[in-house]
Image: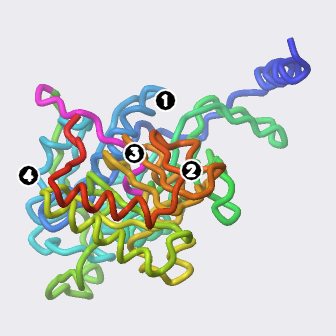
Amino acid sequence: MSEAEERARRRAELDAKVPEVDLRNGHKGICTWAQTSGEELHPAALEILGEARRISEKIDDPTVTTIVVGKNAEKHAQTLIEYGADVVYVISDDRLEFYSDLPYARAICDAIQEIKPEIMIFTASAIGRSLAPRCASRLHVGLSADCTELDIGQYVNRKKNQRFPRAFLMKRPSFGESKLATIIGPWTYPQSATVRPGVFQPLKPDPTRKGEVVHFTPKWAEDDWKTTVVSYELEGSRVELEKADIIVSGGLGVGKEGFAMLQELVDALRANGQRAELGASRAAVNAGYISADHQVGQTGKTVRPKVYIAVGISGAVQHIMGMRNSRTIIAINTDPNARIFSVANYGIVADYKEVIPEMIKQVKNGFTFDVDH
């Protein structure tokens, strides 16, 4: 046994003698918020539901409850059950057609106070980043934002002589995105977190799953309706990196002029009927080569396309964390020692100005990437 292993063994023996503490006060199970976009479920709603199902096996009560709010919200109940929910709380009201902070916060908090979950998970979408802290403030609980990993594990507070055998471990980028910090706070319940969209994969739906549907009515107050959403419009074209089968990403190495060539490749792929988007590294965005809505990485969007083409990207850990789950990664870089090659399935050591024009030519001649298998 090595010295490190011996130290770990002794630490485990000492930890086992620390008294186990339970501060949950009746809170049990896991709850998620199912975001809707219009009258459709947001993809992240199913992603966090799948992760909740996975970690629920490690806590005392594996019940997974989902709260869905909106106009005609009941239409999503069966879908949520098929994707892993045991119980669906439906809060349906014609006035909830569009998202508004106050009524949504009221609805979610009232439901949470009835459900009393041990863990509450929100998606870290633009709406979720507004809703989750409002709910945490109303409920007087902590909130870990922008998590990229979730787990259940033992935590020992030696200072207080307390041991929590099934603490919620919320992991998120920290220290300028260079480290992955684990947030542990088993003192207020529900322990709450927001999770970046695209980080987790939803479970495969099971049409045979059975679950309970609860139609819930919040204790509405007049102040909940102080504002009225008259209409909702998306401004400009939307970059949907999360929905793309193929992402062509450029880094600092392609320069501003290089993104026009990468866009030409994306356009050629789209002309062949393939769902392609233009991505970028943080360095390229910071340099002003392209707008931030194209950014892939820990501070941008987490993606998992079928094909990810990294052009002129060195492979900083922040970028790799955002695209490492892509099915096939193709890296093009002049530096044979670039970190991006360590995660690539195919590496091309060459100037992108020689490679991309040839790729465009082949695509225009009918080549398509196999994204169906």
Residue extending farthest top:
1
Q: Amino acid at mark 4?
A: Lys
- Please state if 359 lies on the left or on the right of 83 as rendered: right
| Residue appearing at x 45%, y 39% in the figure | 345
- Please state if 139 lies on the left or on the right of 215 as rendered: right
Q: Nearer the viewer, residue 312 or 296?
A: 312
Q: Of the numbered discs in the image, which one, if any, rests on residue 340?
A: 2
**Around disc 1, counting alpha carbons within 10 Å, would you say few (fewer than 14), some (14 to 19), or many (20 or more)?**
some
Of the two numbered discs 2 and 3 in the rendering, the one whose residue sits closer to the viewer:
2
Residue under label 3? 326
Mark closest to the chain's N terminus, 2 or 3: 3
Q: Are marks 4 and 1 in contact (CB under 8 Å)?
A: no
Q: Is residue 292 inside the magenta stretch? A: no
Residue under label 4? 75
164 above or below 41? above
Q: Give the magenta-colored segment's residue range.
A: 196-208
Q: CA distance from mark 3 to mark 4?
A: 32 Å
370 above or below 246? above
Q: Amino acid at mark 1?
A: Ile
Residue under label 1? 59
Q: CA distance from mark 4 to mark 1?
A: 30 Å
Magenta stretch mostly in which secondary structure? loop
**Around disc 2, counting alpha carbons within 10 Å, would you say few (fewer than 14), some (14 to 19), or many (20 or more)?**
many
Q: CA distance from mark 1 to mark 2?
A: 37 Å
**Residue 145 x/y as whole percent:** 52, 61
